[in-house]
Image: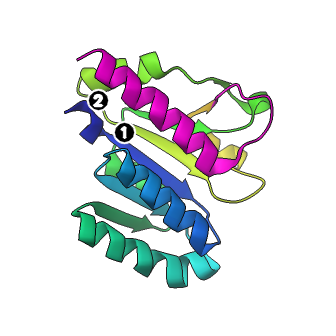
Amino acid sequence: MALEKLTVVLHNAHGVEIVKQMARLVYGFGLSLFVLSKPTSAAAQTGVPEVHRLAFKLGKGLLVVPDVNDALELIKPSEALFFVEKSRGELFSEEEVVSKLREGGVVAFFFSGSEPGFSSKELEVGKPVHLGTPGEIGCIGSAAIALHRTVKRLSEEV
């Protein structure tokens, strides 16, 4: 199924709860792999083991890497979308994502787990996009909306 070709990457998270919530969200939408890029502090010490336990119980995958480039090297996405604020990216299109997935491409959604978000250098390796929300809603909210829109669109076109 096309959904198996979609991966979510949470980059630079510091807190345990954000890591756990993102993992629940990713696995809850049926994705088989969740990637943590550059987890630090409590996210690395406590969050990673807790999410690993959850992944194991659900029969899902968890990959922990030191930075964005390592995630890209291992996932090898045909499209890497970095979710940013409106001023830094173009409007997200689930139609384009679904089209790539249906063609057999691999798509990675990158979300920043901390402020101020992705560096300019990190954004150079992918495509910055935004959801068009009136204000900032955080990475969990952004991931929920992006995944819902994508999964809904995938199911409509079956």
Tag 1: Cα neighbours inside 10 Å, few (<14), some, or many (≥20)? some
SS for callout 2: loop
What kind of element bears circle 1? loop
Mark 1, residue position: 77
The location of residue 19, given as percent across then percent down, is 53, 66
Q: Is residue 71 above or below residue 50?
A: above
Judge whether residue 132 is colored magenta.
Answer: yes
Residue 34 position, x and y percent, is: 39, 56
Q: Residue at x 64, y 72 (%)?
A: 15
Q: In terms of secondary structure, what is the magenta stretch mainly?
A: helix
The x and y percentages for residue 147 are 46, 37
Q: Earlier in the sequence, mark 2 or mark 1?
A: 1
Q: Residues within 10 Å of mark 2 (few under 14, many from 20)?
A: some
Q: Which residue is mark 2?
A: 105
Q: Which residues are magenta?
A: 130-158
Q: Residue at x 41, y 81 (%)?
A: 49
Do the residues under discs 2 and 1 have CB atoms within 8 angstroms?
Answer: yes
Q: Quadrant of the C terminus?
A: top left
Image height of 119 relative to 52, above or below: above
Can residue 100 be seen from the camera position used here?
Answer: no
Q: Tag 2: residue type?
A: Gly
Q: Alpha carbon of mark 2 to alpha carbon of mark 1: how far? A: 7 Å
- Report if residue 26 lies within the magenta region: no
Which residue is at a point 69% across and 28% down the rendered structure image?
A: 89
Residue at image location 45% in from the left, 76% down from the top: 48
Question: Residue 153 is drawn in which quadrant?
Answer: top left
Please say if 7 is above or below 55: above
Report x, y in % for residue 72. 42, 49
Closest to the observer, 124 or 7: 7
* Quarter of the figure that contains the N terminus: top left
